[in-house]
Structure formats: structure tokens, C-alpha cells
Image: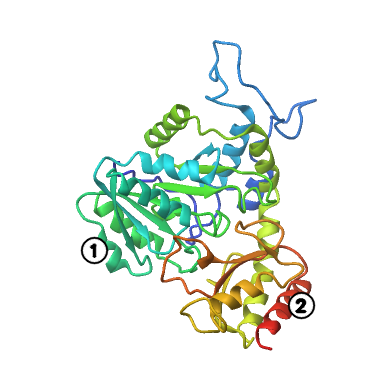
């Protein structure tokens, strides 16, 4: 994979500024991807459940394009400042990128990252397709040392999942490009409303649109975004070849969800700040991890870290997620409802993630109700 230099966009320096057209993100979320303002046009692109089109146009066949997908891609592309491609799931988008890595080439990934990403890379490594190196992305020197002459892909997350570490994306993108790597950032947690990795030097942005973008826990969907036209065409061709295309209903739901992304994220983030501060004072909590933005919080519960028996942090985590009424024990995140889970319950999660780490996806409910419910569960751990 070659180096792809992004073109500049208007930004306020944070990587989450205005778009090239001068519209602010909330306006883009509401207005992009709509039909022309003409009499009798619907306000929204409708569901188009078409498998076949009349020949002679740009689409030809249902695997090549769909008006409903294109509306989703227009909204997300506008928010990220690039050209988006929808995929059937976030994993379909991830594996599309990994499949482009040449045989034997290197891929550098965060030691703490979305488990699907690291497992997909490990699977390819186990079959001799590529080499993987896991690094602490908060340590630029370690990232630079891992980026050898054969590295093809530098994969980044910030905040990381589930450790919630924050990386210097601009500095790391420069390190990756100096090594000749394509730089990929999974922006699922932050969303383009909190950071735009393409503005910071990334070549490709990955989203599990299932999460914050769609936002209602009812649509499986993934996406890639880039500013490089050549890379966009390569990814589009790959999507067409593998058939990893988005469902029409899922794309429609994601567009509807993105119309309120700014409202949902602002409310959930406000709730997350309150809950993180209060949880830090509770005796059942040994550590609170919150990067200061977004709506994901990690609680590291008190208890012996080794084993999963009585008194262990693992047992405390398992008890907490089964002792609440509002908080839902679930592995996904980014919906309007609050969910949580102990991450080390998953085989394959990094051994450096504490056994008692419970990842909270804070929703948009009333924060006092959320705290009352969570506090009751924490209180049970100290009896």
C-alpha cells in the first residue's frame, strides 16, 4: 500500500473544525445526503431495495451502488472531510483494508484496540499473510521503532478500546508516512464530531457505524473514508468484488441516526463527565479512565487482580454488570441506552487490560437515574 498525502481542509486546529464548504458539523449532519430542494421531492432519500437496475447507467447492479447507501456515504464523507464507502459491518471494512496488505508485509497495531481488529490481523498472520506488531500508541518512540522498512499499515485508535488511551495522531501519522506506511485510524469512539483524523494526517478512517453514527442499536454497518481518489477506487473495487456491501435498510437507519449525532453525543458526553467524576469517589472503584471527551468511561474495580475467585476484581465486575436495572449488560456501545461489560470476559482481550475493567457506554438517559442505578450496583460490592 502506497503513501497517500491528504489534502488540507478548513479546521480550527483540533482536527474537528468546519468542513471545506464552511458548514459546521452539526449542520452537515442534518443537511447532507438529502434530495434536491425541488417541489414534491421527499426530504429524505427513501429506501431503495433494488437488486437490479436498467442497463446503461452508473449502477447497473445492486452490488455496485444504491441511492440509499450513497446518502449515508455523503453524510459521513461530509463529516469526516473525505469520500466515504459503506460496508455491511465494521469488520467488513476492517478486513477490506487488511486484505490489501501485501504478503509478508508488516502491520503495526495498538496493543489495546478493538478485539475484532487485532483478531483479524492475527488470523492473517497465522496463515502467513502478514506480520503484526503490537505497540503502545501513547509512546511515539515505540511506534517509530515498530515501523520498519517493510511496514505497510500503521493502524491507530484514539481513544483506544477499552483502555481509553489517547494518542498523538498527527505525530504518529507523520511517523507512519516516513516509514512508507498507509495510516489508518479507527474513529468509532471519538466520531468526526470530536476529531477528524484526515485533518491530522491519516489516510483512511474506519468506523463501526453500528455504534455512534447509527446510534440506536438497530443497524449493523461499517465504513471507510479517505481523501485519496485512487485509494477510494481500490477500496470500492474490493467492496464490489467481495460483496461486503451495506444493507439498504441499515444505511437508511444510519442516515436517520446521524441527523441527531451532535445532540446525542453532547448529551451522552455530559453524562459521562458527571459519572466519571462521581465514580472516582466510590470505594469500589480503584481507577477511572476517561479521556475528557466522548461518552466511553472505563471503571477499574478494586480487588485482587489475579484469578476470578472470591474477592477478585473479575468477580466484582461480573457482579456489577448483573446488578443494575437501567444499565444493560451488552458488548456493543454508542447507542442512546447505557450499556456496560467487563472486557476480560472475552478470550483474546489483551492481558494488560485489568481483569476488573468495566467499559461503560454512557447513553442519553437522565444522569441522576444513571448514577443512582450504577451507585447501587457499586455499593453492593463494598458490603
Q: What number is the disc on residue 248?
A: none
Q: Earlier in the sequence, mark 2 or mark 1?
A: 1
Front-most of residues 111 and 310: 310
300 lies above or below 266:
below
Residue 323: horizontal and vertical position, in percent? 71, 73
Front-most of residues 286 and 177: 286
Residue marked by disc 1 = 145
User: Within 10 angstroms of label 1, few (less than 14), some, or many (20 or more) residues?
Assistant: few
Query: Number of labelled discs?
Result: 2
Say which residue appears at 71% left-offset and 80% top-offset.
Answer: 375
352 lies above or below 251:
below
The figure's colour scheme reads: rainbow
On screen, residue 8 versus residue 345, left or right, reads left
Front-most of residues 315 and 38: 315
**Disc 2 from disc 1: Cα separation:** 47 Å
| CB atoms of marks 2 and 1 within 8 Å | no
Amino acid at each position: 500500500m502506497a503513501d497517500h498525502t491528504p489534502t488540507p481542509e478548513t479546521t480550527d486546529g483540533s482536527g474537528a473544525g468546519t468542513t471545506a464548504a464552511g458548514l459546521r458539523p452539526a449542520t452537515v449532519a442534518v443537511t447532507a445526503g438529502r434530495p434536491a430542494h425541488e417541489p414534491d421531492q421527499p426530504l429524505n432519500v427513501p429506501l431503495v431495495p433494488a437488486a437490479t437496475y436498467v442497463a446503461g447507467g452508473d449502477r447497473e447492479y445492486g452490488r455496485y451502488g444504491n441511492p440509499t447507501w450513497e446518502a449515508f456515504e455523503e453524510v459521513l464523507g461530509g463529516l469526516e472531510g473525505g469520500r466515504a464507502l459503506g460496508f455491511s459491518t465494521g469488520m467488513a471494512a476492517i478486513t477490506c483494508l487488511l486484505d490489501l496488505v501485501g504478503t509478508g508485509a508488516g502491520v503495526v497495531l495498538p496493543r489495546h484496540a478493538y478485539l475484532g481488529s487485532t483478531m483479524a490481523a492475527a488470523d492473517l498472520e497465522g496463515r502467513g499473510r502478514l506480520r503484526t506488531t503490537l505497540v503502545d500508541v501513547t509512546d511515539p518512540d515505540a511506534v517509530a521503532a515498530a515501523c520498519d522498512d517493510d511496514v505497510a499499515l500503521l493502524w491507530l485508535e484514539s481513544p483506544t478500546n477499552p483502555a481509553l488511551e489517547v494518542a498523538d495522531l498527527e505525530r504518529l501519522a507523520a511517523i507512519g508516512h516516513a516509514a512508507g506506511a498507509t495510516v489508518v485510524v479507527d474513529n468509532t469512539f471519538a466520531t468526526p464530531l470530536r476529531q477528524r483524523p484526515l485533518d491530522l494526517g491519516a489516510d483512511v478512517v474506519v468506523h463501526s457505524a453500528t455504534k455512534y453514527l447509527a446510534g440506536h442499536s438497530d443497524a449493523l454497518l461499517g465504513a471507510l473514508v479517505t481523501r485519496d481518489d485512487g485509494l477510494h477506487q481500490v477500496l470500492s473495487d474490493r467492496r464490489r468484488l467481495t460483496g461486503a456491501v451495506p444493507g439498504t435498510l441499515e444505511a437508511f437507519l444510519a442516515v436517520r441516526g446521524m441527523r441527531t449525532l451532535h445532540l446525542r453525543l453532547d448529551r451522552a458526553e455530559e453524562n459521562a463527565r458527571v459519572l466519571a467524576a462521581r465514580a472516582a469517589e466510590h470505594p469500589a472503584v480503584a481507577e477511572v479512565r476517561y479521556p475528557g471527551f466522548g461518552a466511553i468511561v472505563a471503571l477499574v474495580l478494586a480487588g485482587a487482580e489475579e484469578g476470578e475467585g472470591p474477592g477478585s476484581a473479575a468477580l466484582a465486575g461480573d457482579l456489577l454488570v448483573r446488578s443494575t436495572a437501567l444499565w444493560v449488560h451488552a458488548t456493543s456501545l454508542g447507542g442512546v441506552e447505557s450499556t456496560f461489560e467487563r472486557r476480560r470476559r472475552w478470550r483474546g482481550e489483551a492481558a494488560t487490560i485489568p481483569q476488573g475493567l468495566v467499559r461503560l457506554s454512557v447513553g442519553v438517559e437522565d444522569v441522576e437515574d444513571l448514577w443512582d442505578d450504577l451507585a447501587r450496583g457499586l455499593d453492593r460490592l463494598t458490603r
